[in-house]
C-alpha cells in the first residue's frame, strides 16, 4: 500500500457520502454534522501536519510544551461542554486531564520508554489527551447526573449521620467506572475484536508485526494509566462541588 496523497483523500470522500446517504435515508439529523465535520477534520489535520513538520525540524522543548498545553486546553473545553448542571466544568476537566496526561507522559520519559522529542511525545500525547478528554467528560457528567437524580437517598444517608463520601460512595464508583469503561473494554478485546490504530499504522508502514504488537502493548498500558488517573481526578473535583464541609448536599453547584 502506497502512502495516500490528496487525490486518494478526495476519492475516500465516497465513504463520507455513503454515511450521509444512510443517515438521510433513516432520517437521522446528522447530515450537516457529518459534512461539516469531514471538512473540519480535513482542514485541522492538514494544518496540524504542516505544524508538526515545523516542530519536528526545530526540536524545541518549549514548542513541545506549548503543543501539549494547546491540546489539553482545547480538549478540556470540548469535554466541559458535555458536563451539565455544575458550575465551571472547565476547571474540572482541564485539571483532571492535565494531571492524568502529564503524569503518564512524565513516567514514560523518566523510564526512557520514549525520549523527550517532538516526534514521540506529541503523537503519543495526542492519544493520551484524547482518551483523557472522553474519560473526564463521561465521569463528571455521570456523577453529576447520579447525584442530582438520587438527591433524596443521599440526604437521607446524611441525616442518619453518614459522611458525604460514604453517602455518595456508590455514585462515585459508578461514575469512575463509566469514565474508564471504554478503556476497560479495549483492554479485554484488543487483538481479538479489533486491531488498534497504532499497531495497524506501523504494520501498514512496513514494521514487523511483533514490533507493532509490542509498541501497541505499551500504548495500551499508557492509556490505561492516563484514563484511570483522569477519571479519579474528575470524580474528586466534581464530588466536592456538591458537598459543604459540614457534610451537607448543596442545591446550587
Image (cartoon, helix red, strand yellow):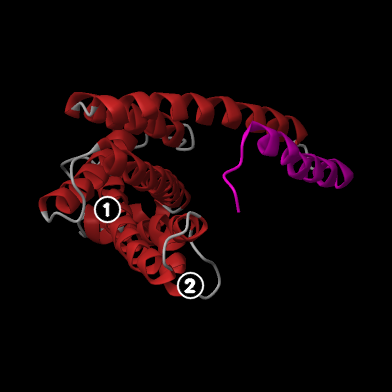
115 or 133, which is in the foreground?
115
Residue at 32 percent across and 43 percent down: it is 125
State the residue at coordinates (39%, 68%): 213
Q: Which mark is residue 191?
A: 2
In x, y percent, where is residue 135? 39, 49
Residue sitting nearer the eye, 243 or 180: 180
Residue stretch in magenta: 1-27
Quadrant, the N terminus:
bottom right
* Main SS, magenta residues: helix
Give the residue at the far left of this rendering.
110
Q: Residue 228 or 251: which is nearer the viewer?
A: 228
At horizontal 30% and vertical 34% (from top left) the residue drawn is: 94
Pinpoint residue 98: horizontal percent, then vertical percent: 25, 38
Separation of disc 2 and disc 1 at Cα?
A: 27 Å
Residue 41: x and y in percent read: 58, 32
36 relative to 230, above or below: above
- Categorize mark 2 by other alpha carbons within 10 Å: few (<14), some (14-19), many (20+): few
99 lies above or below 77: below
**Disc nearer the start of the sequence (2/1):** 2
Q: Is residue 12 magenta?
A: yes
Seen in the picture, residue 161 relative to 62 is either above or below; the reply is below
Classify residue 239 as left or right of residue 34: left
User: Residue 19 placed where, x, y %?
Assistant: 77, 45
- Residue 156 sits inside the magenta stretch: no
2 or 1: mark nearer the eye: 2
* Residue 47 visible in this rendered orientation of the protein: yes
Tell me which residue sits at (39%, 59%) in the image: 180
Check disc 1 and report its element: helix, strand or loop.
helix
Quarter where residue 248 is shown: top left
**How would you rate the neighbour count of disc 1 (Cα within 10 Å): few for under 14, some for 14-19, many for 20 or more?**
many
Q: Secondary structure at mark 2?
A: loop
User: Which residue is label 1 attached to?
Assistant: 232
Amino acid at each position: 500500500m502506497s502512502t495516500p496523497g490528496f487525490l486518494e483523500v478526495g476519492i475516500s470522500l465516497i465513504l463520507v457520502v455513503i454515511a450521509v446517504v444512510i443517515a438521510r435515508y433513516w432520517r437521522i439529523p446528522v447530515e450537516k454534522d457529518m459534512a461539516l465535520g469531514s471538512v473540519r477534520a480535513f482542514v485541522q489535520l492538514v494544518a496540524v501536519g504542516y505544524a508538526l513538520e515545523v516542530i519536528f525540524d526545530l526540536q524545541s522543548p518549549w514548542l513541545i510544551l506549548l503543543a501539549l498545553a494547546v491540546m489539553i486546553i482545547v480538549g478540556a473545553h470540548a469535554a466541559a461542554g458535555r458536563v451539565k448542571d455544575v458550575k465551571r466544568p472547565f476547571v474540572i476537566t482541564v485539571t483532571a486531564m492535565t494531571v492524568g496526561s502529564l503524569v503518564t507522559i512524565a513516567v514514560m520519559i523518566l523510564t526512557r520508554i520514549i525520549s523527550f522529542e517532538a516526534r514521540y511525545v506529541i503523537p503519543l500525547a495526542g492519544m493520551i489527551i484524547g482518551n483523557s478528554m472522553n474519560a473526564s467528560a463521561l465521569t463528571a457528567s455521570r456523577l453529576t447526573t447520579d447525584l442530582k437524580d438520587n438527591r433524596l437517598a443521599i440526604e437521607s444517608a446524611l441525616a442518619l449521620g453518614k459522611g458525604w463520601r460514604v453517602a455518595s460512595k456508590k455514585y462515585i464508583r459508578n461514575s469512575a467506572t463509566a469514565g474508564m469503561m471504554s478503556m476497560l473494554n479495549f483492554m479485554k478485546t484488543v487483538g481479538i475484536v479489533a486491531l488498534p490504530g497504532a499497531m495497524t499504522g506501523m504494520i501498514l508502514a512496513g514494521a514487523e508485526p511483533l514490533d507493532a504488537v509490542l509498541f501497541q502493548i505499551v500504548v495500551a498500558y499508557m492509556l490505561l494509566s492516563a484514563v484511570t488517573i483522569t477519571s479519579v481526578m474528575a470524580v474528586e473535583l466534581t464530588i466536592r462541588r456538591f458537598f459543604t464541609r459540614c457534610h451537607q448536599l448543596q442545591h446550587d453547584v
